[in-house]
Amino acid sequence: MAATQRIARPETKRGSAAAVLFGAISLASLSTAANAAIAFNVRFESERPGMQNTTATFSLTGVETFESRSTGTGKNFTSDFGTGGLITGSYSNVQINNKDQYGGAGGVGKYAVTFTTTGYSLDLATQDGLGVNYFGYWLSALDRGNQVTFYSRGEKLFTFNPSDVLAAVAAKPNPSAYYGNPNPQFAGRNTGEPYLFVNFFHDRGTFDRIVFAENPRGGGYESDNHTVGRFLTKGTGSNVVVTGVPEPTVWASLIAGFAMVGMANRRKIRAITA
């Protein structure tokens, strides 16, 4: 073995160890970044089937029931959620329907719906400037296209996959009890879809915009009792395992991290063959 080869091998060992260490640190950082992209805890009310309000507790909260809104498409309005202005929310391009087998909490009044991939939005603010970290709604007639996305200052935080809550319902001892409209006025109707109250808790910050869309299109995205606030406890609901994916900014970090690990490994290979 040549002298130059004997000299190169200790450097290779050090390079290999450094690459492994760097890789471990990078993977840990990437895991943290991916988890940060899914900082939401999702739960559905399962104390008994048919629940249409949250069991969470709050330091500040309000509810929009849509009862005072006029029906029709493309509606824009501002709600204070019954808080007297402590929380305000601006709805844009939402459709309001009268109660039917697909929506209307309690089997009465009105509900929000969209049938499009662009959907409608809700922009939120608080009088004290501290924001909100909770949103919940009665998600009636859930289908695979019912997507909800949360934003903060224009940055996408989280998009909820409806298949996750379907899996959580399927894991219950009595999943069929959650299917079909639970209200007496529409009992026995639309038994092919679940009716649930779903809670979204942001554990690491606040959000100021929510977008509701039917994507892919396959029906309507019906909901009622839109509840917002700052939560104290998460109530008695069942946890939903979230299988969301990192948003584009996080994927960029992942790709950069893997690229740096690859460069370290290439340096190691060059040292071995020197």
Image: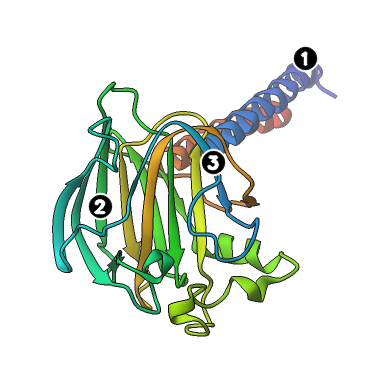
Answer yes or no: is residue 27 visible.
Answer: yes
Could you give the CA–CA distance between mark 3 and mark 1, rounded to whole angstroms?
66 Å
Q: Residues within 10 Å of mark 1 (few under 14, many from 20)?
A: few
Q: Residue at (52%, 36%) from the top-left corner?
A: 57
Q: Residue at (34%, 73%) from the top-left corner?
A: 220
Dot 2 or dot 1: first in sequence order is: 1
Q: Secondary structure at mark 3?
A: loop
As drawn, is 10 to the left or to the right of 50?
Answer: right
Instruction: Name the amino acid, label 1.
Output: Ile
Which residue carries the number 2 mark? 121
Q: Is 180 located above or below residue 155 in the figure?
A: below
As drawn, is 153 to the left or to the right of 254?
Answer: left
Q: Residue at (64%, 61%) from the top-left corner?
A: 48
Dot 3 or dot 2: first in sequence order is: 3
Q: Nearer the viewer, residue 204 or 100?
A: 100
Instruction: Name the amino acid, label 2.
Output: Ser
Q: Quadrant of the N terminus?
A: top right
Which residue carries the number 1 mark? 7
Q: Position of residue 148 (x, y in %)?
A: 39, 55
Could you give the CA–CA distance between mark 2 and mark 1, rounded to whole angstroms?
65 Å
Instruction: Name the amino acid, label 3.
Output: Ala
Q: Position of residue 225 (x, y in %)?
A: 38, 55
Q: Nearer the viewer, mark 3 or mark 1?
A: 3
Dot 3 or dot 1: first in sequence order is: 1
Residue 216, quarter of picture: bottom left
